[in-house]
Amino acid sequence: MAAQALWRDDGCVQETGSSAPQPSAPRRGRIRGRWRRGPRGSGPLRRSPDDRLAGGVAAGLASRTGFDVTVVRFAFVLAALASGAGVAFYVLAWLLVPAAGQQASIASKAVTDRRGIALAAGLSSLLIVVLLIASVLRAGWLGTLAWPPVLISVAGLVLIWRNAPADEQATMRRLAEPLLSLPRGARRSASRNVLRGCVAIALLCGGLFALLAGHPSHAALRPLGGLALVIAAIMLMLGPWWLCIARDLITERQARIRAEERAEMAARVHDSVLQTLALIQRRSADPQQVIQLARAQERELRSWLFDDRPPGSLDGSGLTLAAGVRLIEQEVEAQYGVAVEAITVGDCAVEENLSALLAAAREATVNAVKWSGAQVVSVFAEVEPAEVSVFVRDRGQGFDPDAVPGDRKGLAESVHGRMARRGGSAIIRSVRGEGTEVTLTMPRAAGERQPSRA
Amino acid sequence: MSTPAGSARDGAARDGAARDGAARDGARPRVFIVDDHGLFRAGVRSELGDEVDVVGEADDVEPAITRIAECQPDVVLLDVHLPGGGGQAVVTAIRASHPGVRFLALSASGAPEDVIAVIRSGARGYVTKTISGGDLVDAVRRVAAGDSVFSPRLAGFVLDAFAALPAAADGSPSFDPELDQLTPREREVLRLIARGYTYREIARELFISVKTVESHVSSVLRKLQLSTRHQLTRWANERRLT
């Protein structure tokens, strides 16, 4: 990459304004004139970004040494063609020499770029494998190529690519454009695809040839090398496409997740808060109902925000006692518009007899709400190792349990009967004018007592 | 909302106020309100009405600490959740410099770990924001008089916190039976509070005096604040996780 850049570099002799594409095009006289050494610059060596074709190294060197920039570039190209050392030297200089007007080199920034270093190391190791295979196969120039310059160049270019300032990155991108086959846009991707296809086909042919020529007498690694080339060809052909797809997928997925979260949030807020606000506006004449709606909504919102429990997610399966009591609280409040203050201490899974207890507690709560006339009903449930107790208390008018007409089944059947059938007990204490308390106790099968949730 | 503060109507709080000089204006304790919602502060102010003397407001931790130190109110109504940190930061800072100022925690979320944290840092009680105006006035009076205010919910939290971990008795080095366990009587009192009983009703139920009920509640508060056992923290964390 860098070699080609320098090659073009040499070709586009800037001083003459010539755009001759061939490196041999500059006339001899001019070249000779350039060999004359001009005045030497002073100060430390700096890359010259104003007069750069790649990193401005040659221009910087030229102004420092007094040689013409084209001469320096030509020397670089020669060195690159001869051994590859020119490229390595150029990349190292690009990395280590700060640009004019700046104090820090790219390398000083690159040392903190851990991902860049990892990437460079990974690419280098990959190259080592390729070169190893090539040398084993004695595959012509690949095998004879000097390794260190190649490794240094690749690793250095990766680090420069990741850490160079934006304008230098733009230069690199421009230089690498013909070689980089990453599709960036549909408009210009056709020529790149052709180029990529050609390279891939060449590699594929080489790999297939190596595979087919794999003779028992040859080194055992030979077919392996062919395989590697075939894989490289496939990667080259399909890799950018995969990359592109993966990138699109990630972007699309992130956008979708955001949209879904937003939609879910909007649905929740609509189902709960907005509906309630609308109801409150419609019933603003009835303060009792407004209070009831606000209370129910507050509770629901709180359980969603603080307990991470979506509204209406309490179903029968996996219901715990605390959740069951909370359900009673919410339902009775919503249905009758009287505040229910439920408190649970401890928690446990709801077994069969405990669901009877919950049903009885619900009935007792409904009774209190309907008949006591109290503004608030307290429900207190405590889970103990041997039993579960629920206390339903109101400060209403109270009643005489013995005077309840026989046709009112609520207490007799729903509370007393339910509890008795499961081995529990129900005690009702009521004083006229002071209120009523129903005490429900149910023994529990052996089970763990869990800490309750809020 | 029924809270034991309602039992202030039985006269105990007024006795306490007379006993304790904290309510200097006789029946008008000086109150400071800390809450980040201006609307809520205004609501509390109007609900408290003429019953108390609201001497100041603040909406965050830093201004609260400065202004409370200036005003030196009898009671600070403190929101558990503040943008600049938990309410306990205010309690801790003020109690270090002005031990005479008492705190009554208010919270909308009622998340137990937050409430317990504020109580442990030194607040004298906790009520939910849905408390009625009359009950709030009673609670303020009670706190101003040096008593503690346990809402049924706080009683439930405390029972849960102390009952959830009998493992504390397994010889853990920090275990101090004096501080880390509730006596059966204290447990009974808390249970009745959680069931919605007023202090007077509790006294009648247990055949003790209202004064004794108050001393039990204060003793629970002291244990809650002084107990060093890390189990309290663990309990709160477990509740957050479950």
Image (spheres, coloured by chain):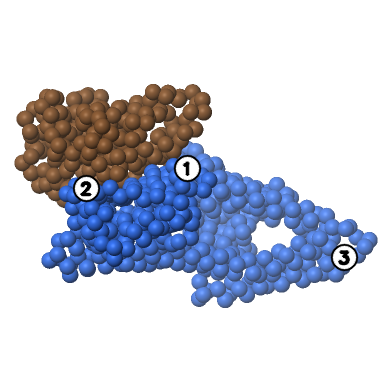
The chain ID associated with circle 1 is A
The chain ID associated with circle 3 is A
- The answer for how far apart the CA atoms under marks 1 and 2 are is 30 Å
Callouts 3 and 1 on one subunit: yes
Q: Which mark is residue A214?
A: 3
For mark 1, give the secondary structure.
Answer: loop
Q: Which mark is residue A431?
A: 2
- Nearer the observer, A235 or B36: B36
Q: Which mark is residue A313?
A: none
- The answer for how far apart the CA atoms under marks 3 and 1 are is 80 Å
In the figure, what tint was chain A given?
A: blue
The chain ID associated with circle 2 is A
Could you tell me if residue A449 is visible in this image? yes
- Nearer the observer, A304 or B189: B189
Left or right of B189, for residue A25:
right
- Kindly identify which residue carries mark 1: A386
Q: Position of residue B120 (x, y in %)?
A: 32, 32
Q: Position of residue A118 (x, y in %)?
A: 60, 48
For mark 3, give the secondary structure.
Answer: loop
Residue found at x 21% / y 24%: B99
- Camera-nearest label, 1 or 2: 2
Q: Height in image: B88 above or below B195? A: above
- Nearer the observer, A359 or A208: A359
